[in-house]
Image (tube, helix red, strand yellow):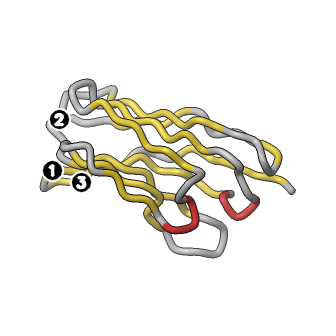
Amino acid sequence: QVQLVESGGTSVQAGESLTLGCANYGQFFSFNELGWWRLAPGKERELVAIVDEHGLKRYASPVKGRFTISSDFERNTLTLQMNYLKPEDTGVYYCWGARGDEFWGQGTRVTVSS
């Protein structure tokens, strides 16, 4: 069974950087897409960044130029480098992976204070 586990969430000040990690602690799965979603207070869960097995990356407009997604599909790992954090980046960040079936982590909380 796939078990995605996020790490790295914490509280930071606006303008600081933070790196989130995600690893599959369960059975290896041949994902074709991996990504990060976030749930901000009072909002619906939104896609932050996604990468496919060919290396194609897409970012949500609010994070373009500030966040970088990196992946290792052979090791089922994923990172999200977040720079120049803003208070509106506050939320719970979820690791996600898919190939037909979808899998989610439990989330890691990021709080950005102004």
State which tag comes first along the sequence, 2 or 3: 2
Q: Are marks 2 and 3 in contact (CB under 8 Å)?
A: no
In front of the other: label 1 or label 3?
1
Residue 97 x %, y %: 28, 47
Q: Residue at x 73, y 57 (%)?
A: 86
Which image quadrant is residue 63 in?
Answer: bottom right
Residue type of the residue flagged with mark 2: Phe
Q: CA distance from mark 2 to mark 1?
A: 9 Å
Q: Are marks 2 and 1 in contact (CB under 8 Å)?
A: yes
Q: CA distance from mark 2 to mark 3?
A: 11 Å
Residue 38 x %, y %: 52, 59
Residue placed most toward the observer, 2 or 32: 32
Dot 1 lies on which element? strand
Dot 2 lies on which element? loop
Which image quadrant is residue 20 in?
Answer: top right
Could you say which disc has been placed on residue 99 in the image? 1
Could you say which disc has been placed on residue 29 in the image? 2
Q: CA distance from mark 1 to mark 3?
A: 7 Å
Give the number of marks: 3
Residue 64 x %, y %: 53, 59
Relative placement, left or right, of 47 versus 14 is: left
Residue type of the residue flagged with mark 1: Arg
Residue type of the residue flagged with mark 3: Glu
Relative placement, left or right, of 101 versus 15 is: left
Could you say which disc has been placed on residue 84 in the image? none
**Where is 8 relative to 94, above or below?**
above
Residue 5 x %, y %: 43, 35
Residue linked to disc 3? 102
Look at the image and tell me in which quarter the N terminus lies: top left
Q: Residue at x 76, y 42 (%)?
A: 16
Q: Residue at x 45, y 36 (%)?
A: 79
**Where is 63 relative to 11, above or below?**
below
